[in-house]
Amino acid sequence: MPPIWPPERALLQVIPAYADGAYTVTDWTVLVTGRHHEGREVAYVGDGVEPESSDSLRTFGAVVQALREHAGLSREEFGERVRFSKHTVASVELGRRMPDESFVEAAEQALGNTGALRRAAGYVARQPGLAAWFRRWARMEATAVTLYTYECRLLPGLLQTEAYARTLFTQQLPPLDDGQIEAQWLARADRQRLLRERPNTAFSFILEEGVFLRRTGGTEVTRELIDHVLQLAELRNVEVQVMPQAQASHAGLDGPLQLLETPENKWFSYCEGQRGGLLISNPKEVSILQQRYARMRSQAHTLEDSWSLLQRMRGDL
């Protein structure tokens, strides 16, 4: 992985390079690496970054920035008045840092003492449950007309049961506390409503057989999971195919991928790794991944054979 830039350097390096509108930075809640080219947007979590941002955090930060600029103060000058570093000021203004009470009070005094920041601070909250690098994809996912998913590691979030998801959350490192686990499950459950609330969206899933054979969470959790997947596969807008364990080779060996078609009929792809995600908008790159997914659909079990295989696996538990 390329070295991670400091946030200020990232802003200086990336925005001029994509000033032509071909690329848009939408979320600076994570540090960004230098891998931005040809329609590829990469986000990685860096040490010391708060990954949970929200619209309210960014709005509060924008208000602070507007008041500071109206007062004719640079970040460094403003930081001296509020006794915080210019880097902290930048983090608040960009919506990466939750402002504490001392910052709000000091900022009020430095920016006219209107009471606006005190009142606004009461509505500031983080956006829980979704990884920062995933949020842009989740926003696109909510309005997609087509969504294709191939997974070889675990069941994708849209198909998970609560017991299966909570098993994954409790095994994360660093460990999550109860509040974080609850927030992640609620965010995942909210996303799952897409399958039933968007009947005109076509969902296709290709799942490795080994994902079920792993029996994550134990026999009962896996039995419930298979029942849940079979139930979702009955929906007219949901297709589930299983890639057989015995398939010696197929077009998806490079790893999991997702493809999405917007209401404007533009296609995007998303690939996720251990600590970050890759959003791809370049039509040539997306086309390659579409070809791979199409090939995988022919290499996986048919819908009927996949259904039968899952039922047999359910019976063997």
Image: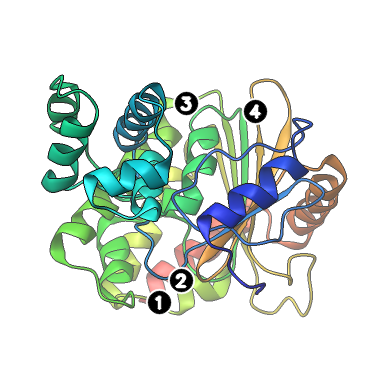
Residue at 26% over, 56% down? 162
Q: Position of residue 272 (x, y in %)?
A: 58, 61
Given the image, on which type of amino acid does mark 4 rest? Thr
Identify the mark at residue 316; answer none if there is no mark.
1
Marked residue nearer the N-terminal end (4 or 2): 4
Marked residue nearer the N-terminal end (4 or 1): 4
Identify the mark at residue 180; answer none if there is no mark.
none
Given the image, on which type of amino acid does mark 2 rest? Met
Look at the numbered discs 4 and 3 and tell me whether their residues touch, using CB distance below 8 Å: no
Q: Position of residue 130 (x, y in %)?
A: 37, 50
Identify the mark at residue 313; answer none if there is no mark.
2
Marked residue nearer the N-terminal end (3 or 2): 3
Identify the mark at residue 198; answer none if there is no mark.
3
Q: Residues within 10 Å of mark 4 (few under 14, many from 20)?
A: some
Mark pair 2, 1: CA separation = 5 Å
Residue at 82% over, 48% down? 38
Q: Secondary structure at mark 1?
A: helix
Q: Which callout, 4 or 3, points to the residue nearer the camera?
A: 4
Q: Where is mark 4, residue-wise?
A: 262
Mark pair 4, 1: CA separation = 40 Å
